[in-house]
Image (tube, rainbow, N blue to C red):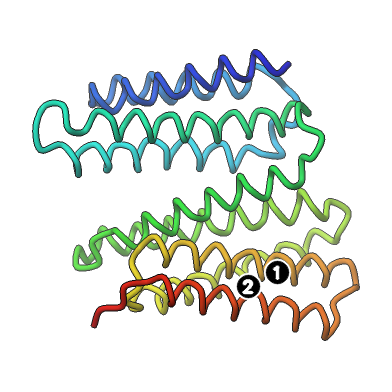
């Protein structure tokens, strides 16, 4: 099952690049249609990772399109970044298919990497969005909150399938609200959008780890201290590697 996933992922990357280069509704619809076809062609756990698939496909198109128009100063300057971005999203699509179709043995570790990548792209897109746009930015902030909720909820369901559904729902909503607060705070820090996105990924993973141990009934002071220590060390590293500007 490895080779079919590789082929689908390569075609996903090519379809994404073509859709971005050609532009317009038709090619965008072709890309999304093909992505849905390749995802649903196998019925293995399609519902378990549907949110990750939907968000990966959406942000692959949005971010690659933004990259193309941001780097297109002449006919060819935006070509290489688009192909690189398409290859990257194609690789993430391969990981998603591999998790979904039980290609990988270490599914949990790979799922963590995949979800972390999605958190990074969602956060990065949020930080580069035009905050002076008013209504459009508020709509995008609302979209970001929905995306974070869906990803966090999916992660909790994947790792703690047997936990009470209502409790998982409350924890996912509470975590999303806190993450949105952190997005606002991190957004004013002069550390650049890449470091800001990395910081959001770190914060989300800390929340998820605390939720995981809470649902297991194993949350202790040591777990909290370990996560706090990791957060502080990574914060120091991020600030140390950032070019701070006021």
Question: Alpha-carbon distance for marks 2 and 1?
Answer: 5 Å
At 50% across and 24% down in the image, what residue appears?
35
The front one of 239 and 142 is 239
Location of residue 183 in the rendering, given as x and y in whole percent from the top left corner? 44, 71
Left of 152 or right of it: where is 64? left
At 78% across and 67% down in the image, what residue appears?
167
Indicate the secondary structure of the residue bearing disc 1.
helix
Q: Are marks 2 and 1 in contact (CB under 8 Å)?
A: yes
* Label of residue 187 in the image: none
The front one of 17 and 76 is 76
Instruction: Say few, some or many: other residues with alpha carbon within 10 Å of mark 2 (under 14 / 14 to 19 / 20 or more).
Output: few
The front one of 32 and 91 is 91
Residue picked out by circle 1? 171
Q: Is residue 161 positioned above or below 197 on the image? A: above
Left of 210 or right of it: where is 147? left
Location of residue 25 in the rendering, given as x and y in whole percent from the top left corner? 27, 25
Residue picked out by circle 2? 174
> Is the C terminus in the top left, top right, bottom left or bottom right quadrant?
bottom left
Left of 119 or right of it: where is 114? right
Residue at the extreme left:
74
Instruction: Say few, some or many: other residues with alpha carbon within 10 Å of mark 1 (under 14 / 14 to 19 / 20 or more).
Output: many
The quadrant in which residue 125 appears is bottom left
Q: Is residue 76 positioned above or below 136 on the image? A: above
The front one of 24 and 201 is 201
Left of 32 or right of it: where is 175? right
At 35% across and 43% down in the image, what residue appears?
63
At 72% across and 22% down in the image, what residue appears?
43
Indicate the secondary structure of the residue bearing disc 2.
helix
Q: Is residue 42 positioned above or below 177 on the image? A: above
> Is the N terminus in the top left, top right, bottom left or bottom right quadrant?
top right
């Amino acid at each position: 099952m490895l080779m079919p996933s590789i082929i689908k992922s390569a075609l996903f990357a090519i379809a994404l690049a073509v859709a971005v280069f050609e532009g317009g509704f038709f090619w965008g619809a072709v890309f999304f249609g093909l992505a849905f076809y390749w995802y649903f062609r196998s019925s293995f756990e399609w519902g378990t990772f549907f949110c990750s698939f939907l968000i990966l496909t959406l942000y692959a198109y949005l971010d690659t399109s933004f990259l193309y128009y941001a780097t297109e100063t002449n006919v060819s300057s935006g070509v290489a970044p688009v192909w690189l971005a398409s290859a990257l999203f194609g690789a993430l699509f391969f990981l998603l298919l591999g998790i979904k179709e039980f290609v990988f043995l270490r599914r949990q570790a790979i799922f963590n990497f995949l979800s972390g990548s999605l958190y990074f792209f969602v956060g990065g897109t949020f930080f580069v969005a035009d905050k002076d746009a008013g209504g459009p930015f508020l709509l995008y902030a609302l979209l970001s909150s929905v995306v974070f909720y869906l990803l966090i909820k999916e992660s909790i369901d994947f790792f703690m399938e047997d936990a009470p559904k209502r409790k998982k729902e409350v924890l996912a909503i509470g975590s999303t609200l806190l993450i949105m607060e952190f997005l606002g705070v991190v957004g004013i820090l002069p550390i650049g959008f890449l470091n800001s996105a990395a910081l959001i990924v770190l914060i989300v993973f800390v929340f998820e780890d605390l939720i995981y141990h809470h649902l297991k009934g194993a949350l202790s002071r040591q777990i909290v201290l370990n996560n706090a220590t990791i957060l502080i060390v990574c914060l120091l590293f991020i600030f140390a590697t950032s070019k701070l500007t006021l």
